[in-house]
Image: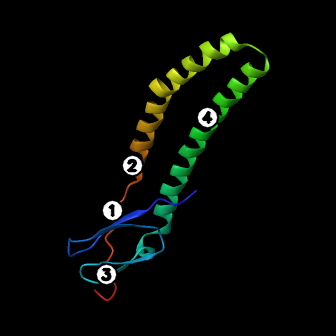
């Protein structure tokens, strides 16, 4: 699972980029270079762990729905399959997914940090 990217804005105000943690970025407008290693590793690890946890929960939900569909298909219950699957998907997309997304966005907001990185060579 790829790490979340960090939004960097140059002090000149003309450039912005999404950069992976641990990489350097050079502003195309003014040539200043920023190093994302200046961000505390513990803060970034907490964001990455939370993101991974919510993705695993989503994948688990999809796997459970797929297992239920497979079970209904193997037991030769097409009526329950054609009635149950749309109902399950309706519940998933109407209730479960929006709740999970709102929790995820709330948690991201709690963990979101603003770091001030100085350009290399500046004090």
Q: Quadrant of the C terminus?
A: bottom left
Task: Point out which mark residue 119 bears.
Answer: 3
Label 2 near label 4: C-beta < 8 Å? no
63 with respect to 71 (left or right) = left
Neighbours of disc 3 within 10 Å: few (<14), some (14-19), many (20+): some
Query: From the viewer's perspective, is residue 98 above or below residue 3?
Result: above
Who's the residue at 58% across and 56% down the image? 1
User: Considering only order in the chain, which callout, 2 or 3, is on the residue closer to the N terminus?
Assistant: 2
Task: Point out which mark residue 67 bears.
Answer: none
Q: Viewer-nearest of labels 1 and 3?
A: 3
Q: Secondary structure at mark 4?
A: helix
Who's the residue at 55% across and 54% down the image? 49
Q: CA distance from mark 4 to mark 2?
A: 27 Å
Q: Viewer-nearest of labels 1 and 4?
A: 4
User: Circle 4 is placed at which residue position?
Assistant: 62
Q: Viewer-nearest of labels 4 and 2?
A: 4
User: Circle 1 is placed at which residue position?
Assistant: 114
Q: Secondary structure at mark 3?
A: loop
Q: CA distance from mark 1 to mark 3?
A: 16 Å
User: Circle 2 is placed at which residue position?
Assistant: 110
């Amino acid at each position: 699972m790829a790490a979340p990217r960090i939004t960097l804005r140059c002090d000149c105000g003309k450039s912005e980029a999404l950069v992976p943690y641990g990489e350097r970025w050079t502003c195309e407008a003014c040539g200043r270079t920023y190093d994302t290693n200046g961000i505390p590793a513990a803060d970034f690890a907490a964001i990455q762990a939370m993101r991974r946890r919510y993705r695993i929960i989503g994948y688990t939900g999809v796997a459970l729905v797929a297992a239920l569909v497979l079970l209904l298909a193997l037991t030769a219950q097409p009526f329950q399959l054609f009635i149950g699957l749309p109902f399950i998907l309706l519940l998933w997309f109407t209730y479960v997914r929006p709740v999970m997304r709102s929790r995820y966005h709330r948690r991201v907001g709690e963990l979101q940090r603003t770091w001030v990185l100085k350009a290399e060579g500046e004090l």
